[in-house]
Amino acid sequence: MRPHGAARMLEVAFRYPIKMYVNALGVPPPAIIAEAHSKGILVGALTGSRRHAIKHAQAGVDVLVAAGGEAGGHCGEIATLVLVPEVIDAIRDYPHMDVLAAGGIATGRQMAACMAMGAAGAWCGSVWLTTKEAETIPTVKEKMLKASSANTVRSRSRTGKPTRQLQSAWSDAWASKEAPDPLPMPLQGILTRPVAAKVDKLAEAGHPGAKQLAAYFVGQCVGLMNSEQSVRSVVYDFMTDYAEAVERLSATVAAPAARSETGS
Amino acid sequence: MRPHGAARMLEVAFRYPIKMYVNALGVPPPAIIAEAHSKGILVGALTGSRRHAIKHAQAGVDVLVAAGGEAGGHCGEIATLVLVPEVIDAIRDYPHMDVLAAGGIATGRQMAACMAMGAAGAWCGSVWLTTKEAETIPTVKEKMLKASSANTVRSRSRTGKPTRQLQSAWSDAWASKEAPDPLPMPLQGILTRPVAAKVDKLAEAGHPGAKQLAAYFVGQCVGLMNSEQSVRSVVYDFMTDYAEAVERLSATVAAPAARSETGS
């Protein structure tokens, strides 16, 4: 994932009719933004703070994915409920830009919450990890379905940068006072990726120690993911839950008017 | 604040026509819950996790204040956007209970977000700290008005338990590798309270070092608190911002119907 390798992958991607390209860490390079725009492809960027948002806006990004500290994988420390309105305010001088809310969103009511604050949509990752279609290994899927939101940690132990993940014997060991500091990115990932692959394989073969070590990136919304569902069913649940949230919020302002009509 | 001292203070409080009593740390003692209920006073409790919520419900608490990790002062690590729906789900067998959302809420749109998720209301603390009426010392108020949401830290350096506060020379010093671990509660508070009072006094007299050390508890929503306002003006802003958020969310489902009417 150095610039040259990334450019070669994007060269292939840009041959297809893709709609959007999103940068996960850092501001997308100017040449890539120009190339995407020349092909009518929107450029998005993950954003963990007001400062990031302004840098992305100045670089010409179209869509910000404001990802709170409750997100799975790489994340900052600012919570989605604060970050979304703060980022929307930060880019008010760039009216063409849209903000998607991310981090901890696994239900339609949470999506509605973010839309009420002005987000243009929601960006979800974790919620797909416990679907029937997911590639998540069964040991980890089972852990996720049982986990509450208190069972994740933010740790540098997987990639060298802070990522939110299931708490496990792995994250516990790296958090202990005796453990060395994780290596900087990308070295920690190079060190741990083959080990994690072996752990997954052994866990699936029933090795008890490997089952304790097995984990994966996931957001705090793992506490809201309590049954294995198809992707289709997750999407339908989002729709009905979103609609109910809209009605619930509307009722908080509509009720007094209704009462006064009845009373007149 | 030992049980005996707390009981004496509550004895005085219960002589007045108060509506609600709220416990900040831990489950309210059974005798106090019984005493409050015998006088028709609601009992509330701050809640940072699903596990806390169930304990409070079993103890007979009426109102849960689900406070996310973005809250000022004592707080857990689960974000408000995840905690509120998780707590509401956890107490679904206790239909008489209400959940107030707390943690990071300084605007009407954030309150609306939480109401959309099923909260019965919002509980705000930080937003009052930069009002004209607040007792916040001017040095700290100015820091809060300038701060973004990235300028808070969660640290044991003030009370011995984790509290979210403005990042300062104080929190930096306690976070350094050379610093001792903070003492357990209540010892750290006993140690630091007189020092913090002296820091505040010297900061107000213009002492440069004291100005760097001066700080206070505040939530991540400090990034949304950018002008000194009266309490009245904050309340009015909440109302209009809340109403706009309701309209914004309603429009996300109403728009297609409106378009189809126009088209017919």
Image (spheres, coloured by chain):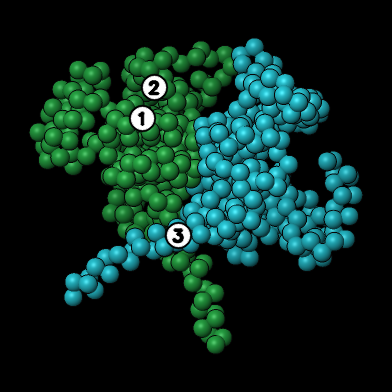
Chain colours: A green, B cyan
Residue B188 vs residue A188: left or right? Answer: right
Rendered location of residue B17, percent (x, y)? 82, 64
Q: Classify residue A232 by image quadrant.
A: bottom left
Q: Quick one: quadrant of the C terminus of chain A? A: bottom right
- Decide which of A113, A86 is in the foreground and name it: A86
Residue B189 in the image: above or below residue B98? above
Most extreme residue toward the left is: A15
Locate residue A229, reporting x and y percent: 34, 51
Give the structural element (helix, strand or loop) at label 2: loop
Tag 3 secondary structure: helix
Circle 2 residues within 10 Å: few <14, some 14–19, many ≥20? many
Q: Nearer the viewer, mark 2 or mark 1?
A: 1
Residue, disc 1? A55
- The quarter in which the N terminus of chain A is drawn is top left
Q: Is residue B255 left or right of residue B45?
A: left
- Estimate the x, y position of residue A71 in percent, counting from the top left: 43, 38
Residue drawn at x 24%, y 68% as measured from the top left: B259
- Label 1 neighbourhood size at 10 Å, few (<14), some (14-19), many (20+)? some
Q: Amino acid at mark 1?
A: Lys
| Residue designated by label 3 | B244
Point 42% across, 39% down: residue: A90
